[in-house]
Amino acid sequence: FNTTKIPDIYDNIKYDSLHNRHILDGLRSIYIAAKNVANFVIPQEYGVFQTQKLRIGRAITQDLLLHIQNNLLKGMEVEPTHRATLYFSSESHLHSLRNTILLSDL
């Protein structure tokens, strides 16, 4: 059983349940099963131990963290050029960002 395919299966089922609901009957039970397995497997993709999760998270999110830091510094200026920033990212980056923030003693 290849667990590396679980995130792909979950993403595909999630997409189809949102965009092809009219075609797919009974998808809810498959979606729930895939989600339960994915909730266990996906966070482990980015390291099993805390040191691994932090190292992998930093490597993946370093550019994003620098960008966020620069935007925070710009927002603290007397006359900020912008007050809101939207970030669009993948789920893998969000897992890595979460791990980095939680494990780096910020």
Image (cartoon, rainbow, N blue to C red):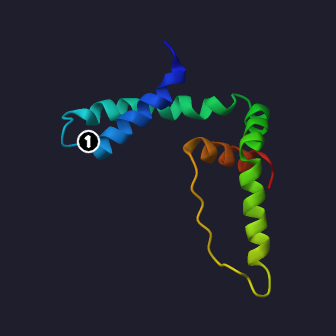
Height in image: 38 above or below 82?
above
- Decide: few, some or many residues near mark 1? Use Cα within 10 Å; few <14, some 14-19, many ≥20: few
Visible residue check, residue 101: yes
- Horizontal placement of 22 versus 100: left or right? left
Height in image: 33 above or below 14?
above
- Horizontal placement of 21 versus 64: left or right? left
Q: Position of residue 30 (x, y in %)?
A: 31, 30
Give me the residue at 55% from left, 44% from top: 91
Q: Position of residue 63 (x, y in %)?
A: 75, 51
Height in image: 9 above or below 79?
above
- Horizontal placement of 63 versus 95: left or right? right
Residue annotated with mark 1: 20
Q: Quadrant of the C terminus?
A: bottom right
Give me the residue at 66% from left, 33% from top: 46
Specify the farthest residue to the bottom: 79
Specify the farthest residue to the front: 81
Q: Position of residue 1 (x, y in %)?
A: 48, 12
Visible residue check, residue 37: no
Secondary element at tag 1? loop
Q: Nearer the viewer, residue 83 or 40?
A: 83
Specify the farthest residue to the top: 1
Q: For residue 59, what is the image quadrant?
A: top right
Q: For residue 72, what is the image quadrant?
A: bottom right
Tally of numbered tags:
1
Q: Position of residue 45 (x, y in %)?
A: 62, 30
Give me the residue at 71% from left, 81% from top: 81
Dot 1 amino acid type: Asn
Give me the residue at 62% from left, 30% from top: 44
- Horizontal placement of 56 versus 36: left or right? right
